[in-house]
Amino acid sequence: MSSFILKILFSGMIVFSPNQNGTEVTVLLLNAGHTHHLSDGSALQDHKPLLIARAGNCTGNCPTRDADIAQFVYEDQSSSVALDSLESAVAGGGAWTLNGSDISVVKASSDDPDLPALSIVRDARSTSSIIPSTSGEREDYSWVADLHQLCSTCTVDSNIFASQPPDTIAGRLHFRNGRLSTYSIGRIGPNVTPVQFKRLDGTGSASSYSQAIATWVEADIEVSGSGIEITEDKFNGDPGRTMTLTPDANNTVEIAVLNLPPFVPPASANNEAPQVGKHFEMYYDLFTNPPSQADRLVPFAGAASGAPSYPEVTWTSIHPTTTLGSDLLNALRLDVGRGPYNRLICPPGDI
């Protein structure tokens, strides 16, 4: 029986919600658009929830030249060049816009062995450190920003898991298999730097919760069999889609699950002073009892006053290109350290 690696990479306005016993994670992509205003009066940029797959071959619904997706991802290119770029990026895969979508990842054939159970990396981090100092420690899931640390009295709205969730939810991915870990830590200058959380207007004191934060999350699944199937069901009961993917010459299938605003990737990965992560305010809408908008805490660069000291660790030392290379992210110009949100501190969250 042949086997291959399925790699799924997540970034953007996305929230992870593990269940109590860690056997399943629901990945929530939020509907974020200009109709939503932040506490400073600015409108949130429109975000586009996307699933982009790169594979050796794809059967089912496998668009490779979607003009809307191509122009969004390659905004600085002409329409024809953008289409060519998208087609080259997905190779034998496909690209979907997610809209009212429930996504599941399942084995391609009922005769294939079951996919490995979910494991969430939670034992790689030094308990006393607010930054990772090694590549192994960087993989710990706890670097994903924890909303409960910022609002201990907040209760998750169970309706977000209903068959027909609120309009806040653009798409969901139900993840029950493989190894879930942090792929990349937010880049603030050349060294690994924590963030602090405080109100967008800067008033009041910062939360004592202060640490480095994940900007990309990774799921790796070792698949035994010929392929993997991505299945979409619609919240409203409309017909969905399927995409059955087989590995490329590197024996890999890669999927990027993104929820980003329009972007042109920066030429340089270095950014000494990223802007505050305004979009983080919207995550609190997933609670039944959120704080008022002005009181919502969002990430700023730098450790909070009174946070533990931390060693000087270069960002590149914990992000080795030998293990973090991705043909798909390179083709999308989102390779590690050069994503659009490196100009902002806009991390995924955990509830």
Image (spheres, rainbow, N blue to C red):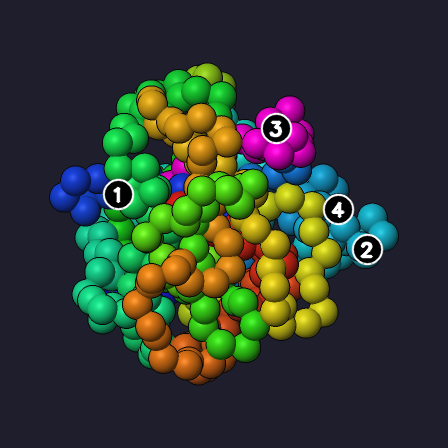
Side (left or right) of 218 relative to 57: left
Sequence-wise, the earlier of marks 2 and 3 is: 3
Question: Which residue lies at the image location 33% right of the left edge and 72% below the top edge?
Answer: 309
Q: Relative to the observer, which residue lies in front, 23 or 252?
A: 23
- Residue 289, compared with residue 88, is above or below; it is above
Q: Position of residue 211 (x, y in %)?
A: 36, 61
Callout 4 crowding tier (Cα within 10 Å): few <14, some 14–19, many ≥20: many
Sequence-wise, the earlier of marks 3 and 1 is: 1
Q: Which residue is mark 3?
A: 37
Q: Secondary structure at mark 4?
A: helix
Q: Which residue is mark 1?
A: 18
Sequence-wise, the earlier of marks 3 and 4 is: 3
Q: Inspect the magenta stretch and tell me whether residue 29 lies in it.
A: yes
Magenta part mainly helix, strand or loop?
Answer: loop
Q: Are marks 4 and 1 in contact (CB under 8 Å)?
A: no
- Residue 55, compared with residue 68, is above or below; it is below
Mark 3–mark 1 distance (CA, rounded to whole Å): 28 Å
Q: Are marks 2 and 3 in contact (CB under 8 Å)?
A: no
Q: Secondary structure at mark 3?
A: loop
Question: What residue range appears in magenta?
Answer: 27-43
Callout 3 crowding tier (Cα within 10 Å): few <14, some 14–19, many ≥20: some
Tell us which disc is closer to us: 3 or 1: 3
- Residue 260, compared with residue 88, is above or below; it is above
Sequence-wise, the earlier of marks 1 and 2 is: 1
